[in-house]
Amino acid sequence: MSSKKGRKLSKTQKLKQQQEEEERRLREEEEEQLQAEKEEEERQERERKEEELERLELKDSERRDDELNELRHLLEENHVAVTKWKTDAVEKAKWERYLRCDGTPEPSVQQEINTYISLWRDDPEVNIGCVLQQCNLALQLFEELEDLLTEAGNKQEAHKYQEALINLQELIHFKHQLATEEILKTASANIDTETGNMQTVVKDDNITLCLWANFTKNPRFKGLQFEEASMSFTLPKQLAVSDIAVRILHTHYDHLSLLAKIAHERRHSSSHRSFGGGDEISADVNLLEQGETKLEEEVKKESEAQDQRLDEEVQSIHGSEGHKSESPESEPSKNNISQVAERRMSQPKTQMETLIAEGDLPSPSVQLTIIDQAEQIQVVDLMQYTPLGGVFYYDVFHLPPQAQQVFNNGLQVFPYPTESNLEENMAPSCPLVGVSVKLPDSVVFLETPQVARWDVAGKEWRMDGITDLSYKEEEAEISFKMSSFQAFVVMQKTYANLPFLSWELRPLGQDCAVYTVRGALITLSITIQGDQCMLQSEQEKGLSHLTEKWMSSSALQRAMINAGINIFVNEYTDQYISSCCKDPLTEHAAYEQMALFASACAFSWSKWNAKCGAEHLVMQVCEHLSPTGVSEDSWILYLLGAQRSQKLKITEKSEDFSTDLYLGSEFHSTFIHMLQDNMSNDGIARTRISNYLFADTVQSLLCATRPLMYS
């Protein structure tokens, strides 16, 4: 009975299994059918997309020549107009200079420069007031020569201006020496009744001179505070009992860094080529028609360029800047400065790196040629660091015989440490000398400043030999000690404010826009109107002389760098900070076209720019005809490439990056034609009457900061 029941149960189970297998088979067949239908739908969708893409590409190809020709015409028209305006401005400046009749020479004429230097060298005037007036004129000439150097068309012309700059800067310093000597020769007639010594401060727009003459030789003397100049020094007993004079000369300009760049100039290897802001008509059209050929040719030319050095035996007038290797007899005189100038006339000189030329990226400072790795750490890389606020010359001299005595030997450097100390290498017998200075009000230090001393023999700034460094941020005061009297500078990292966290270029009206950069440490805005720029910042300290003042793009760039708020880059910047590694020609083409539409469109940073690869750019754009801010939902993402531009389907809030085309949009061969598809007639009309100077200024700022690469 149980056996029959078991067989019946087994048969039931078998039927159930068969039924389940049949159901499973049917489900699988149904799933396979659904999968096949899905694959077919996807295939059809792909084919449809491919057909649509082919249609759009064909349409883009058919109008490609027309779009390129229209862009070329706009760029050429602006280029011709800007070139003519700049040429007329140069001629106008020459005529105004001629009408001034102030005794300064025409800087482009070498004979006039040589005559000016020769006559000034022979001028017997040593009164400090008159000398400073002469130096101020010479400094104006120096700036004009720097500008000419940036525009030099060939090496021969560049060497001519470089030679004039070297001779002029040495003569300026030599005149400071003579005026200092004259003050010290009559120091006994100006002794302070309270201290028994002579101390004086002389100021003008370009220098601050602090002098102290030691008459009491008090062994308990520790140092002196020049209250008027916010500078002080401390001396060891050995010097407190000596016939000496101490000078702190603060020049608000820096000529020594130029000397270092010239003396150590060498070729660099860079991974990203720089580009000019408006000197070439259309990098975009060339890129679209020639691909990468132009880039390869230019990089090859750069790699084959021959660099030259100044002969290391060229002597500098800055003899008082380092005293370990100097003797009193080494102080230059009126005769030997003439000999120095004559020697330079026959020596080849390499082109110095200079500040930003109008419309171009800032030229790179020159990295020093260092072999020893430990030595390299101590020598200042003038691309990585920027000296700010001028140079402080810290000197000690023999107190000269006073006016009633014979004095024919000139101002003599007091040797410290002494030769015996150096030979015996007895550091404890030569205590350090201290100095304290208040940082210039015209400079912003975004980080704790660093100090470097001038090495006369090596013609370089060095960071070793600085001890007991103390920085009081609230008082903006820095103090330290050195083993000898040397010139020094205060520095900060050149790219402290990079990479950018974000950026935005927003129109304020016809031929007016505001360019805002949110840097790593400070946010800055530059208002652009026509060919003029105005800096705006929430940071007030150190920028009052710059903010809310209109100036040219090149002048603003120079002023910002000198003030310590650098946002400008060069082809070597990526060696010091991270970047998005973009193709420079594609990037330049974008800046050209952004400038053309800057009166009607707002452009902004996108997080996807770092995700789209080196061959593409991504930014947020929208038409914006009011001076107010842009609402978040107005932005549209665009993808730019070498051959075409497109509107993207994704938004800034999407989770993943995709190059999918926005539904209903098309491809265009140029960025401006892509933008026009989403612009009103009023917006397009505004771009058509955009002023060429405004477009050139916008382009120069974009090229100088390269926000698509360094953000």
Image (spheres, rainbow, N blue to C red):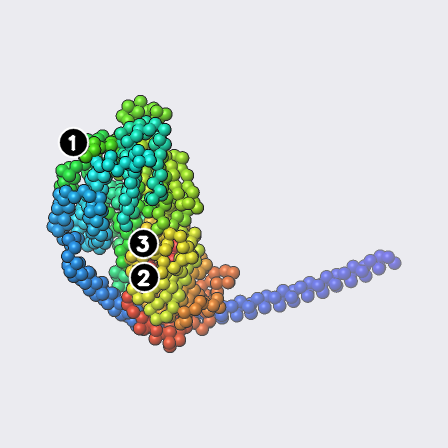
Q: Residues within 10 Å of mark 3 (few under 14, many from 20)?
A: many
Residue that appears at 28% across and 31% down:
215
User: Where is residue 439, by image quadrant?
Assistant: top left
Choose between 125 and 537: the one closer to the eye: 125
Is residue 506 left or right of 5 when viewed as pictured? Answer: left
User: Where is residue 293, by image quadrant?
Assistant: bottom left
Give the numbered dot on residue 550.
2
Task: Give the amino acid type for the residue marked by disc 3 in the picture.
Answer: Ala
Q: Nearer the viewer, mark 1 or mark 2?
A: 1
Q: Which residue is mark 1?
A: 406
Choose between 97 and 55: the one closer to the eye: 97
Q: Dots 1 and 2: beta carbons under 8 Å?
A: no
The answer to whether residue 240 is seen in the rendering is yes
Q: Where's the C terminus, which quadrant?
A: bottom left
* On screen, residue 16 above or below 475: below
Task: Give the amino acid type for the residue marked by disc 1 in the picture.
Answer: Val
Q: CA distance from mark 3 to mark 1?
A: 47 Å
* On screen, residue 359 above or below 562: below
Q: Position of residue 128 (x, y in %)?
A: 22, 44
Secondary structure category for the residue under label 1: loop
Task: Give the amino acid type for the residue marked by disc 2 in the picture.
Answer: Trp
Q: Position of residue 623 (x, y in %)?
A: 41, 70
Q: CA distance from mark 3 to mark 2?
A: 12 Å
Is residue 509 left or right of 353 when viewed as pictured? Answer: right
Choose between 78 and 512: the one closer to the eye: 512
Q: Residue furthest top?
A: 424
User: Where is residue 208, by image quadrant?
Assistant: top left
Q: Residues within 10 Å of mark 1 (few under 14, many from 20)?
A: few
Labels 1 and 2: the sequence-earlier one: 1
Is residue 658 left or right of 23 when viewed as pictured? Answer: left
Give the numbered dot on residue 559.
3
Residue that appears at 36% across and 60% down:
548
